[in-house]
Amino acid sequence: MSKKLNVIGTPIPKIDAGIRITGKAVYGQDVKLPGMLHGAILRAEYPCAEFTIDVSAARKLPGVIAVITADDIDCNNISYKKDHPILKKGEVNCIRDEIAAVAAESKEIAERAIKLIKVKYKEKKGIYDPFDALKPNAPLVNKYLKDSKFAKNISDIFFYEHGNLEEQKKKSAVIISKRFVLPRVTHCCMATSNITADYSSVTKRLTLYSSTQVPFLYQRDMAHALKMNASDIRVIQVVIGGGFGSKLDMYPFEPIAAILSIKTGKPVQIIFDREEEFIASPTRQNMVIDLIAGADKNGKFTFRDVTIVKDNGAFTSWGATTPFVMMQTFSSLYQMPACRFESKAVYTNNISAGSFRGYGNPQAAFAIESCIDLMADKLGMDKAEIRLLNANYAGEITGQGMHYDTCGHIEALKTVIEKSDLRNTNKETLRNTNKYESTNKEKETVNTDSYIRKNPYFVDNVDRYKRGVGIASMMHVGGGAKIYRSDGCGTTLKLDDYGHLTLITGSSEIGQGSETVLAMMASEELTIPMNKIKVINTDTDVKPWDVGVHASRTSFVAGNSVLGAVKKLKEKLNQKAAVLLKCTIENLIYENEEIKNSDGSNSVRIEKVVREMHFGGQNELCTVNHFYEPTSDFQDKQFKGNVSGTYAFAAQSAEVEVDTYTGNIKVLNIHVAQDVGKVLNPLNIMGQIEGGVLTGVGYGISEELIMENGRVLNPNFHNYKMLTASDVPDIHFYPIETNDSLGPYGAKGMAEAPLIPTAAAIANAVADAIGVRIYSLPITPEKVLKAIKEKTD
Amino acid sequence: MEFDIVTPTTKSELLKAIKTNKNNFRFGAGYTDLILELKKKNVLNVTVINLAQLNDKKFNSIERNLKFIRIGALVTASSIVNDKFIEKNFPVLQQAANNLASAQIRQVATIGGNICTASPSGDIACALVALKAKCELLSSTGKTRTVSILEFFLGPRKTAMKKDEILSSVLISLNEKNINIHSGFIKVGTRRSMECSVVSLAYHIQSDKKNLITNVGIAIGSVAPTIRFAENACGFLIGKKASSLARGEKEEFAEKVLKYASPISDIRATAWYRKEALFNICKSILEN
């Protein structure tokens, strides 16, 4: 791409920034339709029980329009494995289970009606540990899973292998075998789950104002659940207040709102409160990873043998397919001669896990990178050197069949090694730079005794604070992921008589900035300024098909789709322009909203060309459609194949200070070097990096949805320790541009990557600081203090 | 949640509101805890006496004379943070206020609310215990009585206040002139903002010209049903030289503080952790 770029690569604010910061954006919570009713859901009181229900008192309450239970509906089960009834009949299997729903004239009446529903429970002993669920005498948790190929209580198994494991084991000078325990964390979207369903008894069509991030799959899933024709369902995406993977699945509350609307003939809105959001929205897959990994005497990795047990919860979501991503990392992050991977998703009476930005990859990175440090220690090798020795490289075809046509892994590693001075870690230098203090503007002093630090008579104990540096890498799909039958995206372009462009894209905006980047691409190619480009992307009745927001695919797939459409639009314009300019169609130049002949001597405004097409006898509109399907392959039954258009790589280093008195970890700096192919919008990319890293820091040191016997103990921000603005470390970003030949302007998907290696890097940094390693996340102050205590005792 | 609201603007309106709504009212000032509580417990038929518009010097201001500083119950945490006199003379209070919740909440959260909530993890309350502050309680009859904060907290959410009383202000004795102070607040938790401490330690240690300790206040939070004043630990330090304590003495001091802790294990931390961290931070304030 030698062409000089004028828009791409420049910092352009998000085009929806204005409406968002002024409160004008219409989130699901803001939707108000005439005659709208308010829905509420009654959930289980016990995580495992039989029950009988009596809704008669609720039905009688004035203002209540409809009350439904499983007996009132005729629906198909939902979820990835169709193992999830929308309303549960006779028994509940997790604390989230929906057993009745109400539509009423106000939210208050709906809530009062819920309280009037009488339920008698007969509590049963549930299973809350997946290892218990695998025992032969364990009761069956989910009876809805049909045609299971697997043993009892197993929802899904992934098995993968390449290379000769036994041979590689023999070659190994060091073999590390460790168990890693990963927590249940949740997305904490700013906007809680919401849906407004509007069924017309006249047209028999259903309109859903939804926050889904996969509108076309959602439309299909909803149609299946309600036994409707998918085309009779219109999905209008509201402004989405946070997705992060949580809106990849359809959940029971959504068809429940639709059923209530169908029953009442009125629009019905359901909005979660925060506690309901914590209990009833999905979580990252919590799991136990047993990893055995080896290296030869020179530090070359020999094999990875991994066995994973995932807590599926009571039902199966798309999140059950996270092994698809994890196995790629185990098989192909760093050069890997042999790999065996096996994972089981096991039913329990816990709340079910879903999908979450990173999709299994942060878990895999934590296990792999911890093991690499352990191997380096045993071999007496430098932690940077062992990684560089094994790093992925351009041209590599991995054991799993992925083609790394471009690869910034080595450069990413070298960058973070250099920036954090990992090779000659001078901890005293690090201590004295005191970067954190100088950048922490707010006078927050939690966890530190700032007064002691400042007072010369009470200088802190030099042994108290220990600093450490840790490093970790990641590899993730960067050009979509062919897991559905199509991984494509459609675009329609409409250039109007005034030279303004309407860009209709199948892709969805969930805050990641896709609509801005797509408009930038069109602006770059057509030289139409950003303020003359409108992006339409929220209505399935209007926009062409797209598989949805996942796998960091939108810039790559929807971007290529826009570029394909622009090419077609230009072909149309060029034909007319050539006539108007009295020249051949070759080598026409687009500049400042004009089309010029090849020597620039003659020009015509784009809008004039459009008008000439429209009104000038030809009577044609300047509208084009394009559908782009990435060139990636489906994997075969052994999960081998080049599944993505391209792959993204990154390395991060974390610098931490551990307070050995309290166990608190202060993350001082995170250095992020990431192969993004090409920076399309520096402002937007920094937003993605910072947001991702902070989610990764939370995953590393603070966040966990704590459960006990199937109940969520901390369904609130008070006790769910999502980090705040004052916890943000200094985040340093070094983009690595490998200019992928398939990416738009060379770009790769980059959005999930920034959180993937963060927790792993922090874990390594903490081990470096205190000399003892912690094998479970989050690394809480308590775990740190206990580890220090055990080490010194 | 349903409630009536009355908004007194003068002291006499306030006293009338207390009398009229006998036993069935709640005070609302910053509303950072109250609304959540009413919502959670689904409280019905209660009257909220809204103090946000109350215009009374005693309630609203920070004033001082030669002997004491008086802080009105409606003074916000951020006003305390920004008060230069408090910052210089009572760092423990300034730091505690600065550790409370977040910058946004500190703008509205009041010192009276922090005290009267009587939470074992109250930040400002903990500092005031270390400072041995006195609470001025105004009754509906218009009379004021003074209760030491050391006798104010009776249990979680239980105080020595009578039903018809309201906290109008707190008094803190001024430090003697020409003394050195070593004063601060340590909050142990996971986050740097929006955190409820799992252990907190407030200390205010005064020394004379010869660096001999003359007056000590040590209070601990989140490790017992109420904030505790560690009297024996305070006594232990009197007459000693802070800067030259032996390691053993520091640990003895920490052990003495620990005697006042009877923590529980909950989802935020185990009792073991609370004790361990408390011991360490107690030691830390005497380290050089």
Image: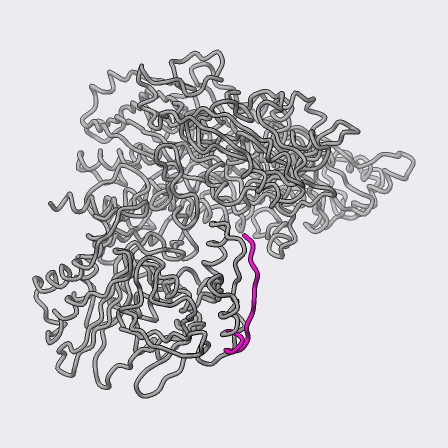
Query: Magenta includes B275?
Result: no
Answer with the quarter of the image where residue A294 lies. top left
Near-viewer residue (B85 or A663): B85
Quarter of the C terminus of chain A within the rendering? top left
Near-viewer residue (A693 or B185): B185
Residue A336, compared with residue A655, is above or below; it is above
Near-viewer residue (A230 or B100): B100
Quarter of the N terminus of chain A within the rendering? top right
Answer with the quarter of the image where residue A708 lies. top left
Q: Residue at x 37, y 21 (%)?
A: A344
Residues shaded magenta: B1-14
In the rendered image, residue A187, in percent from the top left (x then y), is placed at 47, 41
Tell me if A721 is positioned left or right of A789 in this view: right
In the rendered image, residue A214, in percent from the top left (x then y), is placed at 59, 32
In the rendered image, residue A596, in percent from the top left (x then y), is placed at 76, 45
Near-viewer residue (A556 or A236): A236
Q: Residue at x 68, y 43 (%)?
A: A535
Answer with the quarter of the image where residue A57 lies. top right
In the rendered image, residue A20, in percent from the top left (x then y), is placed at 61, 52
Tell me if A622 is positioned left or right of B256 in this view: right
Residue B30, compared with residue A599, is above or below; it is below
Q: Residue at x 55, y 40 (%)?
A: A193
Q: Is residue A312 visible?
A: no
